Image (spheres, helix red, strand yellow):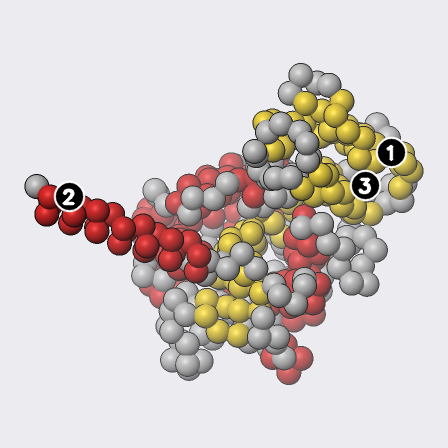
Amino acid sequence: MKKQKKLTRIFFLICLFLLNKNIYSQDPDFYIFLCFGQSNMEGQGKIEAQDKTVDSRFRIMEAVNCSNLGRTMGSWYTAVPPLCRCYSGLTPSDYFGKTMIENLPSNIRVGVVNVSVAGCKIELFDKDNYQAYVATAPSWMTGIINEYGGNPYARLVDIAKLAKNDGVIKGILLHQGESNTGDNQWPSKVKGVYDNLLADLELHPDSVPLLAGEVVNADQGGVCASMNSIIAKLPQTISNSYVISSKGCTDTTDNLHFNSAGYRELGKRYAEKMLSLLGIMPVGVNSIDAIDSYELGQNYPNPFNPETTISFSISTKAFVTLKVFDALGREISILLSEELSAGTYSQQWNAAGLSGGVYFYRLQAGTFTETKKLILLR
């Protein structure tokens, strides 16, 4: 009996050691972002000399084996393009990462995981029903799908789990929609994928925003530009989601894919939005491009203790108030009360001295009012 108890205790200590080792190997200063979608996230832009100069703090974890690049699936490398598959082109994730690195403290690293399939509908990433979609896919698409083991969603989750051992997943980048043009159910289908990713990776929705880029805009003659009105509805379905404007992002003659300059600009815009959610204003940027409406972002991080950052955008000059209330509706703090020009802003709130629980923050700008929930941990 004593021997059995001793063996049980040793087994427990070994498990505890392995658990702690896994926890402490995770670097909180390594920010990881998951990227998925179809051809414009896969990357169709020509990779030029300027794109190959990459800070070693910007990393890519390969989702496929690429002998031509000397890269192995599941390993980290400096994020020199291509960042999706072995022979893909420039993607928004390239200049997303570059812009993040340029604006984050020198101790912060940024890593991306990119699993994308040209031409696919969002249904390909439906973990429960993807087989039906794969069964009808053209042979050229099936070849790409097979590079991801026949299941791109599962490959994204598997690689993300490996990446999560090394850092902290801070956000998800999506560029998809061309193949779902006119599909009014697209926002709810994206929500299904987003919810599954959060569940499978044990992530909290308030701490992992989803950034979705518009397809080639009407101002460039985009053949799928009508889809942007549907993409615009995504924040109504996913509270912690944000639409990245493609206005002015140049494209190729097919009016379906961005060109290299367009990818660079779109990637920067993804980064500008993510940086604003982190409470950082990018160098040389006074406001996020193409602000078309009023928007109140989900605080970040959330849950938090004791500081958090609240970001918002206003499209015109307005008198703005930002207040915090407790669960009973009592005013706790006035964070802002002044006239502001159009732009994107971030405001920090320090809740030191308050009890843990649910609180609410409310933005009023002109006739616009929006309230969101935040959670203080103690």
Name the residue at 67% across, 50% down. Answer: 278
Q: Secondary structure at mark 1?
A: strand
Q: Is residue 135 left or right of residue 299?
A: left
User: What x and y, as percent, mark residue 224?
Assistant: 62, 52
Mark 2 is surrounded, within 10 Å at the Cα level, by few (under 14), some (14 to 19) or many (20 or more) other residues, namely: few
The mark lying in front, picked from 1 and 3, is 1
On the image, the x and y values in percent for residue 117 come to 45, 60
Work out whether mark 1 precedes mark 3 in sequence or the reverse, and give the earlier one.
Answer: 3
Q: Quadrant of the C terminus?
A: top right
Tell me which corner region of the image, top left, top right, bottom left or bottom right, holds residue 162.
Answer: bottom left
Residue identifier under label 3: 314
The type of residue carrying mark 3 is Ile
Q: Dot 1, crowdedness within 10 Å: few (<14), some or many (≥20)?
A: few
Q: Are marks 1 and 3 in contact (CB under 8 Å)?
A: no
Of helix, strand and loop, which one carries label 2? helix
Which of the numbered marks, if any, corresponds to residue 337?
A: 1
Q: Residue at x 68, y 23 (%)?
A: 326
- The tag earlier along the polypeptide, 2 or 1, is 2
Label 2 or label 3, whichever lies nearer to me, is 2
Closest to the observer, 137 or 352 = 352
User: Looking at the image, is 81 positioned above or below residue 343?
Assistant: below
Mark 3 falls on what kind of element? strand
